[in-house]
């Protein structure tokens, strides 16, 4: 995907309870998922980017990680593929990722990367990278129920698990 970006977006909501999620008709789409066998344990991530008729699927693995880290890594890797500032709809089955980037990061930054309980934020390294990448784009963060038959979510789930299976740890 070279120079993904667009000047307008057709955004139509769908019924999330039917597994379709929301934001189904965006022109630049990223679908992400993370997987972990044991938590912690070997993990994988995957991101599917779509711009018009062009798709790119990327995935990777880590020997010792958590599911939340893989969810974050998937979003990071998807956004890294964008070559210029873009309007993006990023769909995830992770409320941790969606709520974190939409609500919690701003509070954590104000609190010196501490939670409301004054504890250090888990996965701060990845949150900082994701926050920095997100600044360059107009991103709508959408949630879809995992394992609900959503085609793209099923694809990235499989690709994340394939990455674990093929991991050279």
Image (spheres, grey):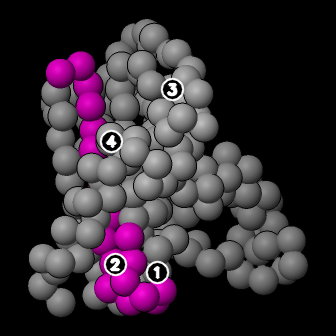
State the image coordinates of residue 167 (x, y, percent, origin top left).
16, 80
Query: What residue is shown at x 22% (from left), y 28% (from top)?
Result: 3
Q: Secondary structure at mark 3?
A: loop
Query: What residue is shown at x 46% (from left), y 62% (from top)?
Result: 72
Query: What residue is shown at x 48% (from left), y 86% (from top)?
Result: 39
| Residue 49 part of the magenta-drawn span | yes
State the image coordinates of residue 150 (x, y, percent, origin top left).
40, 41
Residue 66, disc: 1
Q: Secondary structure at mark 2?
A: strand
- Crowd rating for badge 4 (residues with CA inside 10 Å; few <14, some 14–19, many 20+): some
- Contact flag, marks 3 and 4 (Cβ < 8 Å): no
Query: What residue is shown at x 23% (from left), y 77% (from top)?
Result: 164
Residue 43, disc: 2
Residue under label 4, please give it. Answer: 152
- Crowd rating for badge 3 (residues with CA inside 10 Å; few <14, some 14–19, many 20+): many
- Crowd rating for badge 2 (residues with CA inside 10 Å; few <14, some 14–19, many 20+): many
* Relative to 155, residue 21 above or below: above
- Contact flag, marks 1 and 2 (Cβ < 8 Å): yes
Mark 1 vs mark 4, foreground winner is 4
- Contact flag, marks 1 and 4 (Cβ < 8 Å): no
| Residue 47 part of the magenta-drawn span | yes
Q: Quadrant of the N terminus?
A: top left
* Relative to 81, residue 88 above or below: above
Q: Quadrant of the C terminus?
A: bottom left
Q: CA distance from mark 1 to mark 2?
A: 7 Å
Q: Secondary structure at mark 1?
A: loop
State the image coordinates of residue 92 (x, y, percent, origin top left).
48, 48
Residue under label 3, please give it. Answer: 23
Which region shows up in magenta?
35-53
């Amino acid at each position: 995907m070279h120079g993904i970006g667009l000047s307008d977006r057709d955004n139509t909501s769908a019924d999330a309870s039917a597994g379709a999620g929301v934001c189904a008709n965006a022109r630049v789409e990223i679908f992400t998922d993370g997987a972990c066998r044991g938590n912690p344990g070997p993990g994988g991530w995957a991101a599917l980017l779509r711009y018009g008729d062009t798709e790119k699927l990327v995935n990777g693995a880590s020997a010792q990680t958590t599911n939340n880290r893989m969810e974050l890594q998937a979003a990071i890797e998807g956004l890294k593929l964008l070559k210029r500032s873009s309007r993006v709809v990023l769909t995830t089955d992770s409320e941790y990722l969606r709520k974190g980037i939409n609500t919690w990061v701003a509070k954590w930054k104000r609190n010196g990367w501490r939670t409301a309980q004054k504890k250090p934020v888990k996965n701060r390294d990845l949150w900082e990278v994701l926050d920095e990448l997100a600044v360059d784009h107009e991103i709508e963060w959408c949630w879809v129920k995992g394992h609900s038959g959503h085609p793209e979510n099923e694809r990235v789930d499989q690709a994340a698990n394939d990455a674990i299976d093929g991991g050279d740890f």
